[in-house]
Image (spheres, helix red, strand yellow):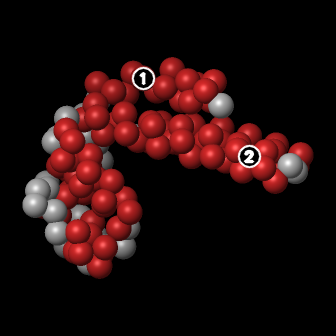
Amino acid sequence: MPALALLVFVSYWQTLDQGFHFDDDNTIVHNPAIRQPVQWLDLWSDPEAFSRTPGAGMYRPLLLSTFAINHAWSGDRGWSWHLVNLALHAWVSILAVQLARRLRCRRFRLCARDCSSLCIRSALNL
């Protein structure tokens, strides 16, 4: 398992000095919903809290909650957002392999390996 997490970080450590891209401006950088004081009820009930762009609302309360926590921790410093994203990808990849092991299913183990590999590679979309 540690090798899998290490693979994630070795593969994408170079992203840590990158800033925000694409829709990050509306969902992170200028999103008042994730700034202090956070209105937690709004994050969990209002789809429009996802983005400051009108009509771009999505109901993603867990994601917004991680955004609020990440913003409280480091503000708008891009490296920390990328680090948290990498850590979450590593964690999910490890969980997929552990689930396969607990189920003791060879076919599923192969699928879990492939899924965790895909999850690792999707971190590229930071």
Question: From where the camera sits, is residue 111 visible?
Answer: no
Question: Residue 24's mark?
Answer: none
Circle 2 SS class? helix
Q: Which residue is mark 2?
A: 112
Q: Residue at x 27, y 66 (%)?
A: 50
Q: Earlier in the sequence, mark 2 or mark 1?
A: 1
Q: Residue at x 81, y 53 (%)?
A: 103
> Going by the image, does 25 lie left or right of 61?
left
> Among all residues in the image, which is located at the extreme front?
102
- For the N terminus, the quadrant is top right
The amino acid marked with disc number 1 is: Trp
Q: Position of residue 84 (x, y in %)?
A: 37, 39
Q: Residue at x 86, y 49 (%)?
A: 104
Quarter of the image holding residue 16? top left
Label 1 environment density (alpha carbons within 10 Å; few <14, some 14–19, many ≥20):
some
Q: Position of residue 17 (x, y in %)?
A: 29, 24
Residue 19 vertical placement versus 115 (above, below): above
122 or 64, which is in the foreground?
64
Q: Position of residue 80 (x, y in %)?
A: 28, 34
Q: Which residue is mark 1?
A: 13
Q: How many marks?
A: 2
26 or 42, which is in the foreground?
42
> Going by the image, does 104 lie left or right of 38?
right
> Going by the image, does 43 lie left or right of 109?
left
Question: From where the camera sits, is residue 91 visible?
Answer: yes
